Image (cartoon, rainbow, N blue to C red):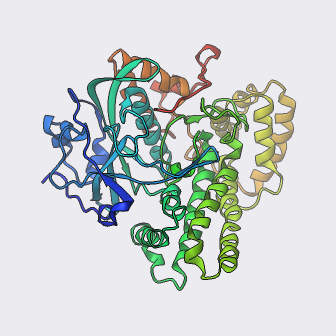
């Protein structure tokens, strides 16, 4: 038995999902297998890379132990509520328990139509599959909670997007695929029993320490709020823009999920938007904490019947919990950003963070490159960083305050290099990988994955990957995979 599935979500009532098998594909071919992740999951990597294993990863063959389902959920998409979304091109094969005892979903993304496809073809093109593989694995290497990529497989078929493109399937691993939108699916139907069943399932699966609480659902809301606040704070520290922070893309487990039109900023701009479908800037970089709280408010609304018998009391409890978001976010964001500046702990009494970010924005300086060069400045070589500012006088004035604070609360430059990555999945590099893949050349994909697996190391042989894009290389828009 290659897969030791232990499926808990499929044991919930059938209104939680639709049972559906992946659609067979023409000619599956393995592009990439994440062997270290396979080991974590107690899966045989050699077998997964075999012809039989690749057929499973492509959805061609369903293991006997699997119980394939498409999960139901709703969601606010760009602020507009859609009562039924669901897995329109993803099929959950089942759950495995990894070497640390954690339950993990094994899902095929691009595996064909489901009852939730809403006129979609249920398939994925090679570009979005490689983008999600690259960015999710980069996030994992950066130490940010995320879904993971186990494998990418070509299907041997074409899919119609703006043009005919090679089809592919991504095998995605997640702590679970339960979203705020999953709760919304039942709450908006007045199905309080399903909301309770789902909440109990989430507690048992993700937060078992809450089961003995006097008010477990209040504790659950607080814990999800805390996890989301911490997650978004970590995104902000690396210049990541999710792009589609809809409630159906907000994981209850606190993982980054659904890498569609996402991007890492090059030059720092708080209003940066890369998603081609975000016409109003709703999910711009600086808006992400506010949107996270908005999404969590939608979750709190779903949980009201579980928080208290009287609605007014339930609303009071929910508001109290939501009030915890700001402190949870600020604690992680401020501590993390001070560490990026080489300052240990404490408060940002001098306003160093905001002032440095303002300088980056005014000078259109590259976010990642500037913080990495700040590590050199901590070693008394500020020439490279200073050269990034068109008007260096502002940086010089800030630097005096920075060095004064560091005299009191210094982090060594070596510690700073463990916090400020040299390498991120820059948009132009990801796009170059996709274009090469369309020519059936996956060598750039492999090389980029190698570089991104060690984001905090200098890697002199790959120094070019740390450089910001030239003007003609800049990628200003990213697109949804559908």
* Residue 165 pos. (x, y %): 38, 20
Residue placed furthest toward the bottom? 214
Q: Looking at the rendering, which quadrant does residue 380 occupy?
A: top right
Residue 316 horizontal/vertical position (percent)? 70, 76
Q: Is residue 218 visible?
A: no
At a point 80% along the width and 36% down the height, the residue shown is 359
Q: Is residue 188 left or right of residue 166?
A: right
Q: Is residue 312 above or below residue 8?
A: below
How many numbered marks does the figure carry? 0
Above or below 283: residue 338: below
Front residue of 457/408: it is: 457
- Left or right: residue 146 versus residue 409 is left
* Residue found at x 66% / y 58%: 329
Q: Does the rendering let one see residue 110? A: yes
Q: Position of residue 449 (x, y in %)?
A: 40, 33
Q: Residue furthest front?
A: 189
Residue at x 36%, y 36% (from the top left corner): 122
Residue found 12% across the figure and 54% down from its top: 1
């Amino acid at each position: 038995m290659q897969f030791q599935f232990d499926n808990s979500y499929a044991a919930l009532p059938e209104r939680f999902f639709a049972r559906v098998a992946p659609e067979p594909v023409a000619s599956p071919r393995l592009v990439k297998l994440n062997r270290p992740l396979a080991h974590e999951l107690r899966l045989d990597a050699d077998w997964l890379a075999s012809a039989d294993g690749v057929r499973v990863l492509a959805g061609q063959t369903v293991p006997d132990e699997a119980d394939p389902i498409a999960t139901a959920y709703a969601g606010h998409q760009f602020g507009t509520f859609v009562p039924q979304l669901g897995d329109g091109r993803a099929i959950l094969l089942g759950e495995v328990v990894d070497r640390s005892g954690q339950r993990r979903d094994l899902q095929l993304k691009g595996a064909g139509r489901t009852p939730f496809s809403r006129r979609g073809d249920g398939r994925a093109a090679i570009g979005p599959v490689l983008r999600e593989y690259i960015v999710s694995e980069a996030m994992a290497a950066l130490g940010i909670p995320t879904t993971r990529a186990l494998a990418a497989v070509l299907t041997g078929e074409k899919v119609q997007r703006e043009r005919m493109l090679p089809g592919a399937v991504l095998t995605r691993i997640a702590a679970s695929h339960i979203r705020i939108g999953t709760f919304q699916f039942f709450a908006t139907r007045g199905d309080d029993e399903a909301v309770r069943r789902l909440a109990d399932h989430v507690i048992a699966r993700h937060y078992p320490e809450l089961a003995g609480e006097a008010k477990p659902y209040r504790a659950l809301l607080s814990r999800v709020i805390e996890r989301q606040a911490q997650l978004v704070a970590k995104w902000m520290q690396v210049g990541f823009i999710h792009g589609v922070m809809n409630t159906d893309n907000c994981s209850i487990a606190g993982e980054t999920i659904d890498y569609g039109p996402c991007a890492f900023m090059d030059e720092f701009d708080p209003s940066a938007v890369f998603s081609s479908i975000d016409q109003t800037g709703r999910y711009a970089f600086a808006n992400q904490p506010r949107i996270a709280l908005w999404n969590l408010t939608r979750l709190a609304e779903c949980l009201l019947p579980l928080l208290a018998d009287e609605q007014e009391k339930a609303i009071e409890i929910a508001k109290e919990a939501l009030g915890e978001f700001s402190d949870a976010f600020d604690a992680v964001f401020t501590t993390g950003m001070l560490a990026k500046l080489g300052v240990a702990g404490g408060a940002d009494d001098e306003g160093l963070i905001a002032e440095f970010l303002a300088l980056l924005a005014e000078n259109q300086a590259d976010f990642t490159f500037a913080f990495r060069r700040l590590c050199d400045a901590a070693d008394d070589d500020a020439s490279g960083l200073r050269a990034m500012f068109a008007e260096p006088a502002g940086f010089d004035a800030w630097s005096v305050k920075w060095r004064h604070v560091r005299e009191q609360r210094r982090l060594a430059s070596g510690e700073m290099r463990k916090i400020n990555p040299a390498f991120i999945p820059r948009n132009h590099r990801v796009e170059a990988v996709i274009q090469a893949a369309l020519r059936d050349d996956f060598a750039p994909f492999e090389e980029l994955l190698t570089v991104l697996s060690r984001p905090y190391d200098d890697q002199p042989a790959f120094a070019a990957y740390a450089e910001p894009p030239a003007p003609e290389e800049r990628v200003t828009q990213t697109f949804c995979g559908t």
